[in-house]
Amino acid sequence: MPSNLIELDSLEFLVIVDNEVDPISKYPNPAVEAYGNLADIAAASRIRPSDRPEGGDTRVLSMEDICCGAHGLSIMVTGVKDGKRRTVLFDTGPDEAVWQSNVKRLGAKVGDVEVIVLSHWHRDHSGGMLKAIPIINAAKEKDAPKVIADLHPNRPDFRGVTLPSFQLSLEADPTFEEISTAGGVVAKNADTHTLADDFFLVSGEISRVTGYEKGIRRGARFAKEKGAWEMDELILDERFLMCKLKDRGIVMFTGCSHAGVVNASRHAITLGEGAALHAVVGGYHLADSETAHIDETVADLEKLNPKLFFPGHCTGSRAKCALERSMPGRVNQSTVGTRFTL
Ligand SMILES: [Zn+2]
Ligand SMILES: [Zn+2]
């Protein structure tokens, strides 16, 4: 049990890729400070002389400076302790071009990223990695260590879903060799461990305790050495990232919650050794769930009583609405381009 996870003074996170774009929403919860992408663009006042209308301090809001959404997740997370800042990247989204262009649009200081934590082997989380690694390394000071890629060792050659009439396969995740060739320092970790001087913790395998969180129905993996698809509904390589905030508690970042967002939340509380669950950020994977499953999830989350939700990616609008109905004011949408401070 890693008891060395330190308590952070504050936490910042920037959503680089998520399914939804919403640069103008307000976040009224006083425990959350949030800036959308539009605020960044206005602050940067990128004025193209040729476009510049006449008169006064006119700034041109260029539509191409607004981020794009994509089905996947990538969040840059910075912990602050005694003035010291440490940054990791949680997942890299589905696509190299989206990750690269959103980072540019956001002016994200990706050279600060010390470790890329991949939540699990699914292309919508790993697809941007081979571009993210060289961009992060190029943004670093000359003698700074290269970015580490923290990965689960059990990488399937392909992942997909076995449908009644055909086998659906995702594109392959990057291989360990490709990640290393791209300039990432491959660190294979199946177990619970801390990162960046104990600012953050990666969960290792998530305990499955609820009766209704059963993974991906008909999920499958392909292993080249076996030459066949086999059932893989549980996605046991999935991990979450967490940290502890002083006087508030645990903030958990979950990629897809194939283990179940309640199972992940309970596991985070166990790893947090008595700390309360403060916030749950990321994909809750309820978009395609039955209504009864969503209701059970919301009821169990209410018992765990986190103060803030940042549902994104595969959460789905029905689950977000159900959370807001049952715990009004706690839901903050985790949309692309938003910078949050807790
Ligand atoms: Zn997934
Ligand atoms: Zn996903």
Image (spheres, helix red, strand yellow):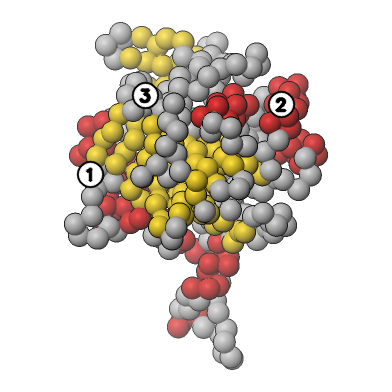
Q: Is residue 64 above or below residue 212?
A: below
Q: In the image, is residue 228 above or below residue 8?
A: above
Amino acid type at circle 3 is Ala
Q: Image quadrant of residue 280?
A: top right
Q: Amino acid at mark 2?
A: Asp
Query: Tag count in the figure?
Result: 3
Q: Are marks 2 and 3 in contact (CB under 8 Å)?
A: no
Residue bearing mark 3: 190
Q: Which residue is mark 1?
A: 183
User: Where 304 falls versus 83 (above or below)?
Assistant: above
Residue 292 horizontal/vertical position (percent)? 75, 21
Whether residue 281 is visible here, answered yes or no, is no
Residue 19 position in % (x across, y down): 56, 43
**Label 3 packing within 10 angstroms: few (<14), some (14-19), many (20+):** some
x, y (%) of residue 201?
Answer: 44, 36
Q: Which residue corresponds to mark 2?
A: 300
Ligand 1 neighbours mark 2 (CB distance < 8 Å): no
> Could you tell me which secondary element the residue under label 3 belongs to?
loop
The residue shown at (50%, 41%) is: 243
Lateral position of residue 313 relative to residue 331, left or right: left
Residue for point 52% across, 69% down = 41
Tag nearer the camera, 3 or 1:
3
Is residue 257 left or right of 117 when viewed as pictured? right
Q: Amino acid at mark 1?
A: Gly
Within-10-Å neighbours for mark 1: few <14, some 14–19, many 20+: many
The residue closer to the viewer here, 28 or 270, is 270
Real-space Cα separation, disc 2 to disc 1, in angstroms: 42 Å
Q: Earlier in the sequence, mark 2 or mark 3?
A: 3
Residue placed at 55% from the left, 47% from the top? 245
Q: Position of residue 250 (x, y in %)?
A: 57, 40
- 3D distance between C-alphas at marks 3 and 1: 22 Å
